[in-house]
Image (cartoon, grey):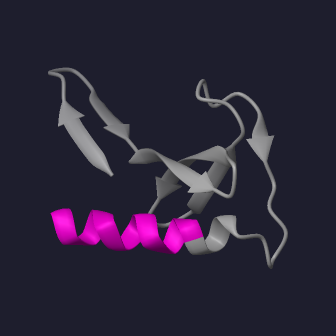
Amino acid sequence: MTCTNMGSMIVCTNPSGRLHVGKRYIWVDYHPYCGPTFYTDWQMNNIYDPEPNDPVWDALGVWLKKREVKK
């Protein structure tokens, strides 16, 4: 989570990204403590609730590994 001191307040934002899953994209907003929230649209309005064996979990694992390498 990135937190920025804006003087009288602190604003924290979660890392977000786009996952390529099959023939579509799923957007993710990731919080290290709470975990991921998935969306079907780039505005992140429509929540996607994946099943336990959904391929989005594999794509999330790849995305998280790429983020760790960048740190």
Would residue 16 be found to the left or right of residue 4 on screen? right
Location of the C terminus (image quadrant): bottom left
Q: Residue at x 76, y 41 (%)?
A: 47
Q: Is residue 8 magenta?
A: no
What type of secondary structure mainly makes up the magenta span?
A: helix
Residue 11 in picture, x, y percent from top left: 31, 31
Q: Residue at x 57, y 53 (%)?
A: 20
Would residue 45 be found to the left or right of residue 33 on screen? right
Residue 67 in picture, x, y percent from top left: 30, 63
Would residue 43 be found to the left or right of residue 11 on screen? right
Q: Quadrant of residue 56?
A: bottom right
Residue farthest toward the bottom in the current orientation of the protein: 53
Magenta stretch: give its range. 59-71
Residue farthest toward the front in the current orientation of the protein: 23
Q: How many marks?
A: 0
Q: Residue at x 62, y 44 (%)?
A: 25
Residue 29 in picture, x, y percent from top left: 52, 47
Q: Is residue 61 magenta?
A: yes
Out of 35 and 62, give the one closest to the viewer.
62
Rendered view: 12 above or below 66: above
Would residue 55 be found to the left or right of residue 60 on screen? right
Q: Residue at x 77, y 70 (%)?
A: 54
Rendered view: 33 above or below 38: below
Rendered view: 14 above or below 42: below
